[in-house]
Image (cartoon, rainbow, N blue to C red):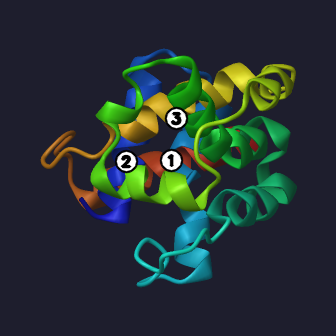
Amino acid sequence: VTQLEHAWQCGRLAEKSGANAPLQLASWLHDLGHLWVSPSESLISGEDDRHEDVAANLLEPLFGPDVAEPVRLHVQAKRYLVTSHSTYASKLSKDSARSLVWQGGPMSPEECVAFESRPYFKDALKLRVWDDLGKKKAWFEDSRDDALQYLDKLMRAVSS
């Protein structure tokens, strides 16, 4: 799926799960850093592009920590879930499993405890699950314009 399709699917999954507007927006924009760092290469470069930090740093001044922090933590959430749920790794997409290695692999028990104490820990876990599910062709088949109008409406709601 394209980055727009993935963003839209994640945002819609958040919406359908009853997430608040900031977490929906975080779900939409969590991979913005991939596009910012290197639009065509970031997913295939063979190294960690730290897209989560890039995106969070861009989003925080615009939308605050309720949007930025789940984005910042969504990669750590993947590492945590791989450690804490024995079957989680087998459900990752090929790209996500490959990038897990570059992103530090499964967390140690000490890292898990530290991660659990972070503000936005639970939101990051939700976002991570939607991130993993939002990679299906032909989900939420509204038009591109409809998707972007919804995103615009959501951004206005969160920033006001």
The residue that label 2 is drawn on is: 8
Residue 48 on image: x %, y %: 61, 68
Q: Residue 17, relative to residue 158: is it above or below?
A: above
- Nearer the observer: mark 3 or 2; the answer is 3
Q: Position of residue 24 (x, y in %)?
A: 55, 34
* Left or right, residue 9 beside residue 111: left
Name which of mark 1 and mark 2 comes first in the sequence: 2
Residue 28: which numbered mark, if any?
A: 1
> Which residue has dot 3 on it?
128
* Quadrant in which the C terminus appears: top right
On screen, residue 33 versus residue 138, left or right, reads right
Q: Quadrant of the N terminus?
A: bottom left
Write down the quadrant of residue 127 in the picture.
Answer: top right
User: Which numbered mark, 1 or 3, is in the foreground of this view?
Assistant: 3
Q: Position of residue 28 (x, y in %)?
A: 50, 47
Please tell me in which quadrant of the rendered image residue 69 appears: top right
Question: Are the two marked residues, 1 and 3, in contact with CB atoms closer than 8 angstroms?
Answer: no
Q: Mark 1: which secondary structure?
A: helix
Are the residues flagged by discs 3 and 2 in contact, CB closer than 8 Å? no
Q: Residue at x 60, y 77 (%)?
A: 36
Could you tell me if the residues under marks 1 and 2 are in contact, i.e. CB atoms within 8 Å? yes
**Label 2 is placed on what type of residue?**
Trp
Label 2: element kind: helix
Amino acid type shown at disc 1: Trp
The relative height of residue 30 versus residue 82 in the rendered view (above or below) is below
